[in-house]
Amino acid sequence: MSGKNTDYFGINDLLTEEQRMVRDAMHDFVKAEIRPNIEEWAQNNHFEQGMVKKFGDMGAFGPTIPAEYGGGGLDYISYGLMMQEIEAGDSGMRSTASVQGSLVMYPIYKYGSEEQRKKYLPKLASGEWLGCFGLTEPDYGSNPGGMLTNIKDMGDHYLLNGSKMWISNSPYSDVAVVWAKNEQGRIKGLIVEKGMEGFSAPKIDNKWSLRASITGELVFDNVKVPKENLLPNADGLSGPLGCLDSARYGIAWGATGAAMDCYESAKNYAMERIQFGKPIGSFQLIQKKLAEMLTEITKAQLLNWRVGTLLNENKDNIASQTQKISMAKRNSVEIALNIAREARQIHGGMGITGEYPIMRHMMNLESVVTYEGTHDIHLLITGFDITGISAFK
């Protein structure tokens, strides 16, 4: 199982039997469905649409959403472990699952009406439908409150105009949760469906990162959105930011999974690669690298587990853990990037090839360090929490 060589502090003993079963089942799924194909998909910049239904069958979409709406009804540590295993396979694959669960299903469940929950959640959970999340704009990333996308009340419907950028899943999505300003300047959430006149989702090409994931834009040209598609319980920036908390938490576990995969590959290579008549793992500098990798992974695992424990105690109020989630996301991605770079050196020239996962993880993580809040923004969130003084104004 993933993590067999990385559970240095016996974190497995902190997990319930159900949590271990969830992790092991996802590990086996990744081994069977992702690992044999991922290098080819990444090399060819190919998003395997068939994985959407397979993820749905595995319960990877909305695992914390109640079962009555098609979700898994699982706790937050189980959710984190699933994301860890998927991203040990590939960050792009985890992005597909994260967006569907945390950024599409979560806001519909949290902010939607009962009718919206029943209409959309089961089809999203099963993988029959794919969804995306429209917040980031070409000119507004770290400052989403400045968004230009807007809605006007036309009596029996809303008129939606604007555009969104860097949207995972968008070209193949059946539904999009879109955030826009109303005429009073308040941010509202709407469910926009494929096929609505004036709605398009062009693909973004020429990516060096997340190449097994699909990324695009969302463009709205006088799109008529029915009034019943407005999320009734979302008002203001707290709506989309609440969704980002859920996604960032999954990323904290996911990036740690990528780090674990790089470490395990480097350790195995170091024990097999012979130079100067002995395995390179016998040399002091290689042992130093491996020891430091394992130390950082262990610290990240404990941080993630603690945040998951806190979320399980505050299931209905993810925002109460915003700052801790932010710290965990930033930490996990930073250590994963550092470990990927050290692992690449241990692999030598072979580390740049598709024979090993290192360069693919490294390139993927260059996106993960930016999305759902950049590395620097997360530092400022922590700084604000420490000092009570906002650096954003």
Image: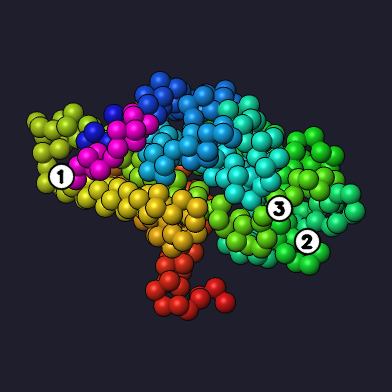
Name, please, the residue furthest toward the right.
155
Q: Residue at x 43, y 63 (%)?
A: 323
Sequence-wise first label, 3 or 1: 3
* Closer to viewer: mark 1 or mark 2: 2
In the figure, 110 relative to 321: above or below? above
Label 3 neighbour load within 10 Å: few <14, some 14-19, many 20+: some
Q: How many numbered marks have been drawn onto this rendered protein structure?
A: 3
Q: Secondary structure at mark 3?
A: loop
Q: State yes or no: residue 47 in magenta.
A: no
Sequence-wise first label, 3 or 2: 2
Kindly indicate whether the residue at mark 1 contacts the one at mark 3 (C-beta within 8 angstroms): no
Q: Nearer the viewer, residue 343 or 212?
A: 212
Q: Nearer the viewer, residue 365 or 342?
A: 365
- Label 3 sits on residue: 232
Query: Residue type at mark 1?
Result: Gln
Q: Residue at x 58, y 28 (%)?
A: 126
Q: Is residue 28 left or right of residue 212?
A: left
Please report the bounds of the magenta region as a residue range.
Answer: 6-24
Q: Residue at x 41, y 78 (%)?
A: 387
Q: Nearer the viewer, residue 89 or 262?
A: 89
User: Where is residue 101, by image quadrant?
Assistant: top right
Q: Secondary structure at mark 2?
A: loop
Residue 139 at x, y = what percent? 67, 60
Query: Residue type at mark 3?
Result: Pro
Answer whether residue 35 is visible to the viewer in this image.
no
Say the numbered circle drawn on residue 182.
2
* Closer to viewer: mark 3 or mark 2: 3
- Label 1 sits on residue: 287
Report how far apart the C-alphas of labels 1 and 2 lie in the structure. 58 Å
Q: Residue at x 42, y 44 (%)?
A: 76
Answer whether residue 297 is visible to the viewer in this image.
yes
